[in-house]
């Protein structure tokens, strides 16, 4: 039998004047939690040792959790397969399919998650593209973004004769993962497809915009968008919380304060509704509404900062398939369950 804890100088039942937890001494919370969780003492025995009622013990344990004295970890059972987790996630988000990669490992010194995620996610992206059943002449659209760029560094799946085209302009962007023609070239090489380039900035100026729309080389790509069979896109985290965003995004935009993510450089709020920003009417990018009509739309995203972005994007109907890792999948399920 564990040694009885010393009784506090103030009666426990009077430790709070309103009968609510919140004013108990930290030492008392620790004593109750240690007896109950570490030494397997019943609540009745804890009450006897501390000289209080069982109802007070229950309040002590609840307050210990709230203050972080007790931390409970929920570990998925070993028999919960990745297929079960993928099915749970697809049902929770209303998606057709979820493809799970292995967990993305923690990067080593001097590296980021982005540096290591491409090789982990690429096989799952390949499975998603294979399942899309693309045939020669079908159109595959690809977005900009770090995730798609890193995935495109690795082998995907042979799709000979498929036409690969960007979903957004971006030849004026300094970062390679916002250079959509570069990503288009990489993906086309990885699948054995034919690249179609969009030689236009994402957000041209008011004078340049009308003339670009009349250019035959640009029209050729824009006319591919409504006939796309599949789109492969990254999901952006909340734009104003990111350290790196496309140069055309106004960093001090009041309207973007409500944005929780984006696909194809189109921003949306937590309900999946589009969030406009200054100059949006000149943005050369696939419209969100158009994404809803593409038969196969594959989003690729991992990380805690993408959880809300993924949920809102699925709610908006901007993708019907998702490639992610188990850690992100579990975090999404936890967020949906707690909503």
Image (spheres, rainbow, N blue to C red):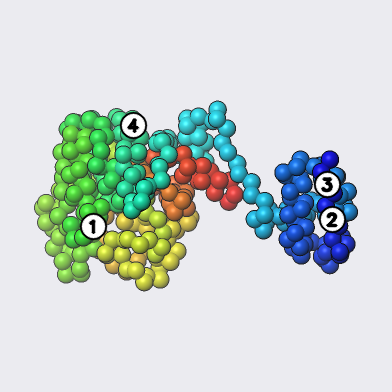
* Nearest to N terminus: mark 2 or mark 4: 2
Q: Position of residue 254 (x, y in %)?
A: 40, 71
Instruction: Identify which residue, 244 or 31, lies in the foreground.
Output: 31
Q: Are marks 4 and 1 in contact (CB under 8 Å)?
A: no
Q: CA distance from mark 1 to mark 3?
A: 64 Å
Proximity of marks 2 and 4: CB atoms separated by less than 8 Å: no
Secondary structure state at the residue bearing disc 1: loop
Give me the disc on residue 296: none
The 10 Å Cα crowd at callout 2, few under 14, some 14 to 19, many 20 or more, is: few
Q: CA distance from mark 4 to mark 3?
A: 59 Å
Q: Please, what secondary structure does the residue beneath circle 3 have?
A: loop
Inspect this view and state whether residue 47 appears: no
Q: Earlier in the sequence, mark 1 or mark 3?
A: 3
- Label 2 sits on a secondary structure element that is loop
Q: CA distance from mark 4 to mark 1?
A: 28 Å
The residue labelled by disc 1 is 175
For label 4, the residue is: 127
Residue placed under numbered mark 3 in the picture: 3
Q: Which circle's residue, 2 or 1, is located before the other in the chain?
A: 2
Query: Marks 2/4: CA distance?
Result: 62 Å
Is 313 left or right of 131, judged from the image as shown? right
């Amino acid at each position: 039998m564990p040694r009885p804890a010393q009784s506090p100088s103030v009666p426990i039942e009077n430790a709070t004047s309103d009968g609510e937890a919140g004013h108990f001494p930290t030492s008392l919370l620790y004593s109750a939690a240690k007896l109950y969780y570490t030494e397997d003492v019943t609540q009745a025995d804890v009450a006897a040792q501390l000289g209080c009622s069982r109802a007070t013990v229950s309040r002590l344990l609840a307050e210990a959790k709230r203050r972080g004295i007790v931390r409970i970890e929920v570990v998925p059972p070993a028999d919960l397969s990745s297929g079960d987790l993928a099915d749970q996630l697809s049902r929770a988000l209303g998606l057709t399919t979820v493809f799970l990669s292995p967990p993305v490992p923690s990067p080593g010194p001097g590296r980021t998650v982005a540096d290591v995620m491409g090789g982990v996610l690429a096989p799952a992206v390949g499975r998603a593209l294979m399942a899309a059943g693309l045939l020669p002449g079908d159109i595959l659209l690809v977005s900009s973004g770090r995730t798609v760029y890193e995935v495109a560094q690795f082998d995907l799946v042979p799709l000979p004769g498929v036409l690969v085209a960007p979903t957004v302009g971006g030849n004026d962007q300094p970062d390679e993962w916002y250079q959509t023609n570069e990503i288009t070239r990489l993906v086309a090489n990885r699948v054995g497809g034919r690249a179609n380039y969009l030689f236009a900035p994402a957000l041209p100026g008011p004078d340049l915009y009308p003339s670009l729309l009349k250019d035959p080389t640009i029209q050729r790509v824009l006319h591919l968008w409504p006939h796309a069979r599949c789109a492969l896109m990254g999901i952006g985290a909340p734009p104003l919380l990111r350290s790196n965003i496309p140069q055309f995004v106004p960093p001090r935009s009041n309207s973007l304060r409500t944005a929780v993510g984006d696909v194809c450089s189109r921003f949306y709020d937590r309900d999946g509704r589009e969030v406009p920003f200054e100059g949006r009417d000149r943005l050369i990018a696939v419209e969100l509404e158009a994404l809803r009509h593409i038969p196969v739309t594959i989003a690729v995203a991992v990380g805690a900062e993408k959880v809300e972005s993924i949920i809102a994007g699925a709610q908006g109907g901007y993708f019907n398939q998702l490639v992610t890792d188990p850690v992100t999948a579990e975090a999404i399920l936890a967020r949906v369950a707690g909503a």
